[in-house]
Amino acid sequence: MRTLRYLIEKEFKQIRRDRFLPRIIFMIPLLQLLILPFAANFEMRNINLGVIDLDHSVYSQRLIDKVLSSGYFRLTDVSSSYEEGLSAIEDDRADILLEIPADFEKNLSTLSISANAINGTKGGLGSAYLSSIIQSFNTEIGNIMSVPTGPTITSTYLYNPHLNYKNYMVPGIIVFLLSIIGGALSALNIVSEKEKGTIEQINVTPVPKVVFLLSKLIPFWVIGLVLLTLGSLIAWLVYGLAPVGSFATIYLFAAIYLIAFTGLGLTISAVSSTQSQAMFTAFFFLIIFALMSGLFTPINSMPEWAQKVTLFNPIRYFIDVMRMVYLKGSHFADLTHYFFIVCLFAIGFNALAIIAYRKR
């Protein structure tokens, strides 16, 4: 224990004396947490709307006003015919066309929606938004005219009632930032000592390699927990997001998860010859893990083979845990299977680090 304490003290001194590393550890992850939730946002706003109003009635104007007041659309083109409206789409002046027929007020006839589907996400979501607004308008008009409009549908959005995409993204981004600390930065640790030549001084000592690897793991484990605290504070101050569940559950999972991912980083560092080789290898795994973790797109929407591959992705499990604790208020009893899986990753990755590091 005394040897381990001295080695940990050495690691913290090296981190503190490095002019560049503390900035990477704290500034870059926190800046990403401030920027990414605004950039990685699948909500569609300011969709360019072209209108072909052949009715020019009170109802048609009321419908247009309702669409524009939703906040999703902005009127960028008004055409007198469908051909003119298509020209607006071809010239990128409009993303979606709403055609109101001449007998709309009299018969409440069918409306036509045409979307530019080059950007499939914008076209699909924009059409869905517009269809929902039109359905709401039909219900209002039906109530005014005492005309039955079919069954009334009431939607209740559980856990994220305002459909705020940042509430979905922020917990996942916090996990990704911890993965960078545990995986990428720890991957540079042992290999940097190889390049400096100081690793030989450790190798000729009777320090067991398990103790040596623990001295490399613990500093990044502590730094990761500090960053988790700062990230949770930013999520509360900037996004107004606080976990519905217990912080204790989050920290328990984070403690095991950081051990797992730091073990992966130390494995990469032990088998690498240069820092650039270790960095590229670490970011290769990080990018694959991030894209297949459900951070940006739901895992259920992936092909079946990709869903099976995600079972070997540790980021996937911790992101699920963070979102369940933050948004659903899940307790540890609801997450025990996730806990055992993360523990298996911790044991496996650190066993690989012990095997890969050789005192020679």
Image (cartoon, rainbow, N blue to C red):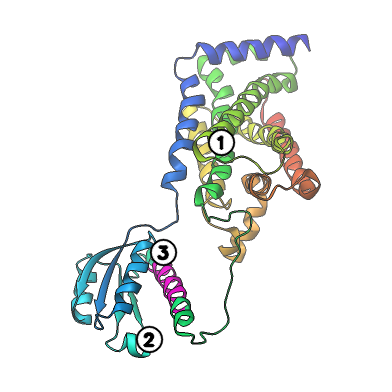
- Relative height, residue 255 to residue 339 (above, below): above
Which kind of residue does numbered mark 3 sit on? Thr
Query: Whole-percent x and y of residue 274?
Result: 49, 27
Query: Whole-percent x and y of residue 170?
Result: 54, 43
Q: Is residue 79 magenta?
A: no
Q: CA distance from mark 2 to mark 3?
A: 24 Å
Residue mark closest to the camera, 2 vs 3: 2
Residue at label 3?
121
> Which quarter of the figure is the C terminus placed in?
top right
Left or right: residue 255 compared with residue 116: right
Crowd around label 1: few <14 · some 14–19 · many ≥20 (10 Å): few
Depth check: give the residue in front, 220 or 133.
Answer: 133
Q: Quadrant of residue 116?
A: bottom left
Q: Which residue range is magenta in the image?
A: 123-138
- Mark sitting on residue 110: 2
Q: Quadrant of residue 100?
A: bottom left
Residue mark closest to the camera, 1 vs 3: 1
Label 3 secondary element: helix
Residue at label 1?
236
Q: CA distance from mark 1 to mark 3?
A: 30 Å
